[in-house]
Image (cartoon, grey):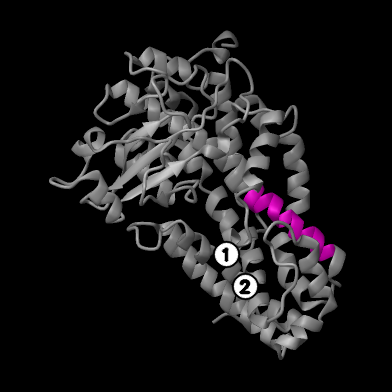
């Protein structure tokens, strides 16, 4: 049994061995449909990492997809150019992984690009995949019309890259670490009796403690993520540096992020639909609180603590000061949304999607294919995580997906009369 623990799985179905009741119920739909193109595309909208997809109006030069390559996937009689102009083409680009070193010669990493198409059923499906940022003979464009196994493997490579970006950028950096910056600034600059301190505290109060534990047990030198993924400490540092170049204040403002990616009208984007409702609810509540304590824009400008709080966080294009109540409301809404709703969106579904290991491989043990040669199931199984890594990833995403016993939902807090009496804040109707 110990020897077998480090072996490859023999077949895709064998991954069920580590899924026992009730785990298999949680992953049932994914286990059944994970390899279907519609499910692959659906996850870019509503999976663990629904922030990478963006509308594509013009193909980048580094991704030379032609009409001839994808015409079988398009609406009959239409051309790729027409579909691009109609706004039916989307792209997911993992350029952020370019230059990030792999953990070892047995755990590989790449920076793929994936082209997706909204078909006549309003499904988002993949139509082309390139497994590097540099086109050429050694970096072919894989298509749905290719050999079944090579297309399956190409999609697995995209999902493995997505796993790494999700865990280290979307989840760790853009919720945990960003929230920690705001929490530290809050302690440094705001008195405990300040209304904004009271407003933020329930959303960030555990962030520093959680992050300290994560640095040791998840991403540290001996952490789980370091053991089972394709990125070690040096790679994590490089990836975070790359990600920081793309981090902007507006990217934390949910409506602005949706607009920047051109995702306002794509159908079945429940992450967007639910997120907009939650953003609006938080914005409404924060606005009501701000109006209680600030009767004018000048009051915001003269609040030294608030101005120092904002200044403490300021970096890149983040504001260095706030001059109006409207700006303060948006700023605080972004902080609360990031620490609560955004974190929930990218954290609590991890087991549902990653519990079925082939759907989001934490590592790939063979290098990405450089030709459209024959790939069989044996080659695929030798590429996927071994039994040990699979078991450790399963346990990790299960633990991360659990809510705490004392967890209080946003709505419960905003409708709680004791909270209202303690703070003087209005109740959310």
Residue assigned mark 2: 330
Total marks shown come to 2
Residue extending farthest top: 3
Where is residue 407, by image quadrant? bottom right
Tell me if 20 is positioned left or right of 98 in this view: left
Q: Are marks 1 and 2 in contact (CB under 8 Å)?
A: yes
Q: Residue furthest bottom?
A: 295
Residue 29 in the image, given as x and y percentages of width and height: 36, 41
Residue at horizontal 79 percent and vertical 73 percent from the top? 307
- Residue closer to the observer: 74 or 364: 74
Cα distance between the residues tagged 1 and 2: 8 Å
Q: Is residue 218 visible?
A: no
Q: Which mark is residue 94?
A: none
Q: Position of residue 30 (x, y in %)?
A: 38, 39
Could you tell me which residue is drawn at 40 percent across and 45 percent down? 91
- Our reading of the magenta stretch's main secondary structure is helix
**Quadrant location of residue 239?**
top right
Q: Let me know if residue 100 is in the magenta part.
A: no
Can residue 119 be seen by looking at this rendering? yes
Decide if residue 306 is on the left or right side of residue 70.
right
Residue 195 higher or lower than 256, as above or below: below
Horizontal and vertical percent for residue 292? 70, 88
Range of magenta residues: 173-187
Marker disc for residue 253:
1
Q: Tag 2 or tag 1, which sits nearer the N-term?
A: 1
């Amino acid at each position: 049994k110990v020897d077998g623990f480090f072996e490859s799985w023999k077949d895709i179905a064998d991954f069920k061995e580590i899924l026992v009741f009730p785990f298999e119920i949680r992953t049932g739909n994914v286990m059944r449909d994970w390899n279907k193109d519609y499910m692959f595309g659906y996850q870019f909208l509503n999976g663990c990492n629904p922030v990478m997809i963006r509308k594509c109006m013009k193909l980048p030069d580094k991704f030379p997809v032609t009409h001839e390559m994808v015409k079988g996937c398009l609406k009959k009689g239409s051309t790729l150019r027409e579909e691009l102009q109609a706004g039916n083409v989307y792209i997911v680009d993992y350029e952020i992984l370019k230059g990030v070193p792999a953990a070892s010669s047995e755990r590989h990493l790449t920076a793929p690009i994936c082209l997706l198409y909204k078909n006549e059923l309003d499904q988002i499906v993949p139509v082309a995949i390139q497994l590097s940022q540099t086109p050429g003979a050694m970096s072919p464009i894989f298509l749905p019309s290719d050999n079944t196994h090579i297309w399956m493997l190409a999609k697995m490579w995209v999902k493995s890259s997505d796993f790494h970006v999700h865990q280290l950028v979307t989840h760790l950096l853009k919720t945990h670490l960003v929230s920690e910056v705001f929490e530290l600034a809050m302690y440094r600059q705001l008195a405990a009796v300040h209304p904004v301190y009271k407003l933020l505290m329930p959303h960030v109060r555990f962030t520093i403690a959680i992050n300290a534990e994560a640095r040791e047990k998840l991403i540290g030198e001996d952490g789980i993520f370091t053991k089972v993924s394709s990125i070690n400490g040096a790679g994590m540092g490089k990836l975070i540096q790359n990600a920081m170049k793309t981090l902007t204040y507006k990217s934390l403002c949910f409506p602005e992020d949706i607009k920047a990616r051109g995702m306002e009208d794509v159908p079945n984007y429940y992450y967007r639909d639910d997120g907009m409702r939650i953003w609006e609810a938080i914005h409404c509540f924060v606005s009501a609180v701000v109006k209680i304590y600030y009767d004018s824009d000048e009051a915001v400008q003269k609040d030294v603590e608030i101005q120092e709080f904002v200044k403490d966080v300021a970096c890149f294009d983040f504001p260095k000061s706030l001059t109006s109540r409207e700006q303060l409301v948006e700023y605080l809404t972004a902080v609360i949304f990031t620490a609560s709703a955004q974190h929930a969106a990218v954290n609590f579904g991890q087991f549902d999607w990653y519990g079925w290991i082939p759907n989001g491989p934490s590592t790939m043990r063979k290098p990405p294919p450089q030709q459209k040669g024959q790939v069989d199931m044996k080659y695929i199984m030798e590429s996927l995580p071994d039994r040990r890594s699979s078991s450790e990833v399963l346990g990790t995403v299960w633990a991360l997906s659990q809510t705490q016993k004392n967890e209080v939902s946003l709505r419960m807090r905003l409708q709680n009369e004791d909270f209202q009496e303690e703070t003087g804040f209005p109740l959310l109707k």
